[in-house]
Image: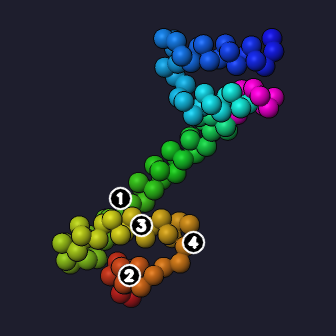
């Protein structure tokens, strides 16, 4: 089968009422066509590639860990901050602060103020 025949078959599957069409999005379909044209593995660079599936699994694991860390952090915030309104008003910033810490990004002045409010005095 030639590349052009493979592309025609893929196009027919994508444009018909099939399971394939239901499962493959437009971006993945276009990537699959490029893969055929360039002699790459069919699913390379699509959400169905083994690398992407593994990356998604790892990201889901990281999200679960982040949620656990956020639950712990929120508990610490409630424990050490007497102003309950500040907690709820600042929760979005706390999530951003946690992400900055996870990725070793620099903290700005608002970040430092938030940290001082959250950390217990020793």
Q: Position of residue 36 (x, y in %)?
A: 75, 26
Q: Is residue 5 left or right of residue 14?
A: right
Element type where label 2 sits in the image:
helix
Measured as percent of width and height from the top left, residue 59 is found at 54, 47
Which of disc 1 and disc 3 is earlier in sequence? 1
Q: Nearer the viewer, residue 42 or 75?
A: 42
- What whole-number distance in Å separates the C-alpha atoms at marks 4 and 1? 21 Å
Q: Which residue is mark 4?
A: 104
Visible in this render: residue 50?
A: no
Give whichever of 75, 24 is nearer the camera: 24
Please report whichever mark, 3 or 2, sits nearer to the chain's N-terminal start: 3
Look at the image and give the residue range highlighted in magenta.
Answer: 36-44
In magenta segment, residue 41: yes
Q: Earlier in the sequence, mark 2 or mark 4?
A: 4
For the residues marked 1 and 2, what is the alpha-carbon distance in whole angstroms?
22 Å
Tell me the distance, in whole angstroms, between the alpha carbons under discs 3 and 2.
Answer: 11 Å
Of mark 4 and mark 1, the one earlier in the sequence is: 1
Q: Nearer the viewer, mark 3 or mark 1?
A: 3
Name the residue at 79% across, 32% down: 38
Name which quarter of the figure residue 117 lies in.
bottom left
Residue 110 is marked as: 2
Residue 91 part of the magenta-drawn span? no
Q: Locate residue 121 relative to residue 58 in the image: left or right.
A: left
Q: Which residue is mark 1?
A: 71
């Amino acid at each position: 089968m030639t590349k052009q025949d493979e592309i025609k078959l893929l196009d027919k599957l994508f444009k018909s009422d099939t399971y394939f069409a239901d499962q493959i999005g437009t971006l993945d379909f276009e990537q699959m066509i490029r893969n055929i044209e360039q002699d790459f593995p069919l699913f390379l660079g699509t959400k169905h590639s083994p690398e992407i599936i593994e990356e998604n699994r790892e990201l889901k694991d990281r999200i679960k860990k982040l949620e656990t860390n956020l639950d712990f952090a929120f508990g610490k915030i409630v424990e050490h901050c007497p102003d309950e309104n500040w907690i709820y008003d600042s929760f979005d910033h706390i999530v951003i602060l946690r992400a900055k810490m996870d990725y070793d990004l620099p903290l700005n002045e608002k970040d430092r103020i938030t940290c001082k409010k959250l950390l217990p005095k020793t």
